Amino acid sequence: MEQIILTSMTFNSFNESAKLVAEIKKDSLSYETTFFIPVSEINRLLSILQKNNPDKDINDYLESLDLEDYVEYKLYFSALNDSKIDREEILYFNTGKLSKQIRA
């Protein structure tokens, strides 16, 4: 069975999309992938992760960096007990294709 495990998310106040980095595992293979979701879907994604991790506050892992023209936000999911997300949820965001990067 395929597992999609989110590792990080980066977005800023200037762009309309957020960058998600995930590790996809299936059987004995795993690879890292990057995909984008609309900024408007961030709350929905965070709600899913918060539901899967009721003992953690997702907002505690949000970092911000004030740059000259915009603010950049980063969120690392490694501290969460469960950062898995269903493939159907990813497909629901409907913003593009997963770009596979297989590493040996």
Image (spheres, grey):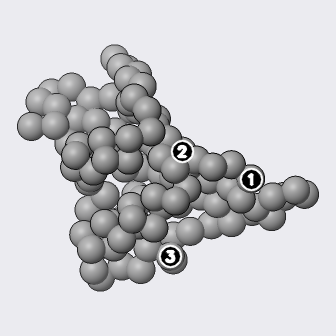
Question: Is label 3 in contact with label 2 (beta carbons under 8 Å)?
Answer: no
Residue 17 horizontal/vertical position (percent): 58, 47
Q: Name the residue nearer the viewer: 76 or 69.
A: 69
Which residue is at a point 43% across and 32% down the rendered structure image? Answer: 96
Badge 1 local density, few (<14 within 10 Å), some, or many (20+)?
A: few
Horizontal side of 78 relative to 59 (left or right) equals left
Front tag of 3 and 1: 1
Q: What residue sits 46% from the left and 58% below the top?
A: 41
Q: Which quadrant holds residue 22? A: top left
Q: Secondary structure at mark 2?
A: strand
Looking at the image, is 80 positioned above or below residue 60? above
First of labels 1, 2 by sequence position: 1
**Disc nearer the start of the sequence (3/1):** 1
Q: Which residue is mark 1?
A: 14
Quarter of the figure with residue 33: top left
Residue ID for mark 3: 59
Mark 3 and mark 1 in contact? Answer it, CB < 8 Å.
Answer: no
In the shown orientation, is residue 21 left or right of residue 18? left
Mark 1 belongs to which amino acid?
Phe
Considering only order in the chain, which callout, 2 or 3, is on the residue closer to the N terminus? Answer: 2
Q: Residue at x 44, y 39 (%)?
A: 95
Label 3, label 1: how far apart the Cα atoms are: 20 Å
- Disc 3 from disc 2: Cα separation: 17 Å
**Residue 94 visible from this viewpoint:** yes
Question: Tag 3's secondary structure?
Answer: helix
- Residue under numbered circle 2: 19
State the residue in front, 94 or 4. 94
